[in-house]
Amino acid sequence: MQQVPFSEYTPKVYTFTKSNGMKTLSLKLDDHTFEEAEAITAQLNIARNRYINEAVDLYNRYHHRKLLKHALAKESALTRKESMNILREFEKLADED
C-alpha cells in the first residue's frame, strides 16, 4: 500500500478561526477552484481569507437582491388585481362628471 503525503490533502481545505467577530469555517474546494483562487490572490496580493470574505459578501448581496426581486414580483402580482379594480372605479367617477 502506497502512502500519500499529508501535503496532498491539506492545500484543498481552508480553515478559519474565530477572532474579532469572525466565525470558524472549514471549506473544501474543487482543485480547479482552489488553484484559480490561489493564482488570483497572488496577483492581487491579498490574503486568501480576505478574498474569500469578499467573494461570500458579494454572493450574499447578489442573492439578497435576487430574493428581494422575487418578493417584490410576488407582492406586485397580488396587488395588481386590486389596483385595476380601483382604477376602474376612478374611471367611472371621471366618466360621471
Image (spheres, rainbow, N blue to C red):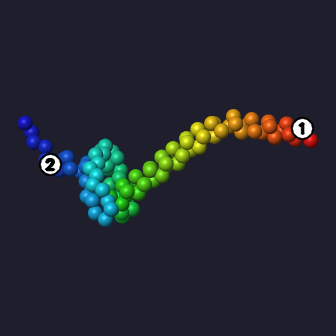
The amino acid pointed to by label 2 is Phe
If the image is split into quadrants, where does the N terminus sit?
top left
Badge 2 marks a residue whose secondary structure is: helix
Residue 6 circle label: 2
Residue drawn at (80%, 37%), measured in percent from left and top? 89
For residue 87, side relative to residue 65 (left or right):
right
* CA gap, disc 1 and disc 2: 83 Å
> Mark on residue 80?
none
| Position of residue 95 measured from the top left corner of the image (x, y, whole percent) | 89, 38
Q: Is residue 45 visible?
A: yes
Closer to the camera, 92 or 29? Answer: 92
Residue at position x 20%, y 46% in the image: 9
Q: Position of residue 54 (x, y in %)?
A: 41, 57
Badge number at residue 95: 1
Q: Residue furthest left?
A: 1
Marks 1, 2: nearer the viewer: 1
Identify which residue, 21 or 16, lies in the foreground: 21
- The residue at the point 58 percent across, 38 percent down is 74
User: Percent position (x, y) of residue 79?
Assistant: 65, 38
Residue 13 left/right relative to 36: left
Q: Amino acid at mark 1?
A: Asp
Q: Residues within 10 Å of mark 1 (few under 14, many from 20)?
A: few
Q: Is residue 81 left or right of residue 38?
A: right
| The one of 81 and 64 positioned closer to us in this rendering | 81
The residue under the point 51% across, 44% down is 67
* Mark found first going from the N terminus, 1 or 2: 2
Q: Quadrant of the C terminus?
A: top right
**In the image, residue 6 lies at what x, y percent?**
14, 48
